[in-house]
Image (cartoon, grey):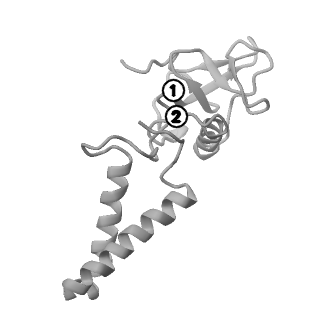
Amino acid sequence: MIRHPFFLDDHVVAVALDEAATTATQRLAELLPELDTAAGEPFRKQLHAHLAAMLTGQTALPRLVHGEDTFGDRFSLDDLPLPRAGMGYAVQRLDTDTLLDRTSGTFLPVRDPGLSGLFESFDRAHAAARDWLKARNATVDAYPLAIVPASYDGELRRHVLIYGVLTQSP
């Protein structure tokens, strides 16, 4: 279980991961001269990837750090076969009809006329979700969030969850 909302690409985590892979490769190269050649860099990169997988719970170990897919797999609105056109990316709190409001930084129901819940890119929605968790020193275990395609209905003057209310488990 994660105690702090660390993400794999947080500067301190990225630096520590790079240093661990580099130091381990250098130490092993003292014993295995083959690693002190061009073969050392692919080894270091694979070690880095394995350490990242271990930290993000992709192995038998518990997740210690949030990975790139914390809020779902990266997607492009243009590539999704949507029943209704997506106008932007939204951060949805799972099991609810609430979206992260870009202005207030709080979760508001899709029917709230003050909601400004569409982000122009996956990256901006991801950053907003990440910032929201970090501001609360929380994790996705406590606050499950997902980046989802969303739209705005001008006639009804409300946001539309294209896939409806997503749940934590199917």
Residue 146 placed where, x, y %? 52, 30
Position of residue 66 in the picture relative to residue 112 (left or right): left
- Is residue 89 at all visible to an observer of this figure? yes
Residue 160 placed where, x, y %? 63, 18
Q: SS for tag 2?
A: loop
Position of residue 22 in the picture relative to residue 76 (left or right): left
Q: What's the residue at 27%, 87% (across, down)?
A: 36
Q: What's the residue at 75%, 18% (across, down)?
A: 154
Categorize mark 2 by other alpha carbons within 10 Å: few (<14), some (14-19), many (20+). Answer: many
Check contact, mark 1 vs mark 2: CB within 8 A: yes
Q: Which amino acid does label 2 sit on?
A: Thr
Q: In which quarter of the image is the N terminus?
A: top left
Q: Nearer the viewer, residue 3 or 116?
A: 3
CA–CA distance between discs 1 and 2?
5 Å
Q: Which amino acid does label 1 sit on?
A: Ala
Q: Is residue 154 above or below residue 46?
A: above
Q: In this view, does 130 lie above or below 32?
A: above
Residue 49 placed where, x, y %? 34, 60
Residue topped by disc 2 = 139
Residue topped by disc 1 = 142
Q: Quadrant of the C terminus?
A: top left
- Is residue 85 at all visible to an observer of this figure? no
